[in-house]
Image (cartoon, rainbow, N blue to C red):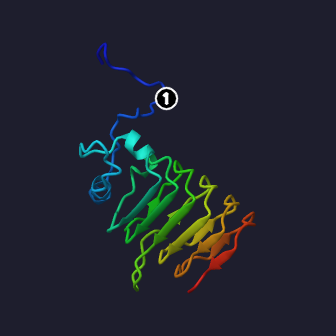
Amino acid sequence: VDAHTTISETCQPDSFSVVYFKDARFENQLLRDASIDVNSDGKVQYSEAEAVTELNLSGYIKNFTGIEAFSNLETLIAKNYSITYIDLSNNVKLKRLELPGFNTSLRSPLSAIDLTKNTQLERLYITHTKIDDIDLSKQTQLKDLELSYNPYLDSLNLTNSLALAQLFLFD
């Protein structure tokens, strides 16, 4: 530490800090989008991530570490991912979440998801996974829900989801 170094008491990154990604495929998809890497430096700064409100991803992403930096994200669509868990607890502005798994006899390895902090969700689409339990009791804005082709799903809590207009649960 020198005289020019500042240390945050909260340990929060500043807007110039670079977002850390564990999965190169995830990072590379983001970097190919000029609306994300606006300064064209080949890195995603927190300020760039915070400016993003929509992501549409595909391509066997195995780890979504770094998604937490996208704190203003309202729409996340991720196709053909290969994850067991995704942490969206910092993405509290999400209104639309689509996680369609592999549309084959294979299932996405996704087996758990915690959406308790995503209370603004209006559209949720999660298919072809190994999820066995999902609690949507805090999603009071939820209007459209599809949880089809989730053969392990044996517990679904929709308490307080009074705005729900469409529900799809195909087997």
Residue annotated with mark 1: 10
Name the quadrant of the N terminus. top left
Q: Where is residue 99 in the image (x, y as percent from the top left)?
A: 47, 69
Label 1 residue SS:
loop
Q: Above or below — where is 110 with respect to 92?
A: below
| Outermost left residue | 41
Horizontally, residue 142 falls left or right of residue 26, namely right
Q: Which of 157 and 122 is in front in this view?
A: 122
- Tell me what residue is drawn at x 39 percent, y 56 percent: 64
Crowding at label 1, few (<14), some or many (≥20) Cα neighbours within 10 Å? few
Q: In which quarter of the image is the C terminus?
A: bottom right
> Where 54 falls versus 148 (above or below)?
above
Note whether residue 111 is visible.
Answer: no
Name the kind of residue labelled 1 in the image.
Thr
**19 versus 149 height, above or below:** above
Q: Residue at (35%, 50%) from the top-left corner?
A: 36
**What residue is shown at x 66% (from left), y 68% (from top)?**
143
Asked where in the image residue 41 lies, by quadrant, the reply is top left
**Quarter of the image holding residue 45?**
top left
How far across and how far down the image is residue 79, in percent?
A: 40, 70
Residue 68, given in percent of the width and then of the height, sits at 45, 48
Can residue 21 be seen from the camera position used here? Answer: yes
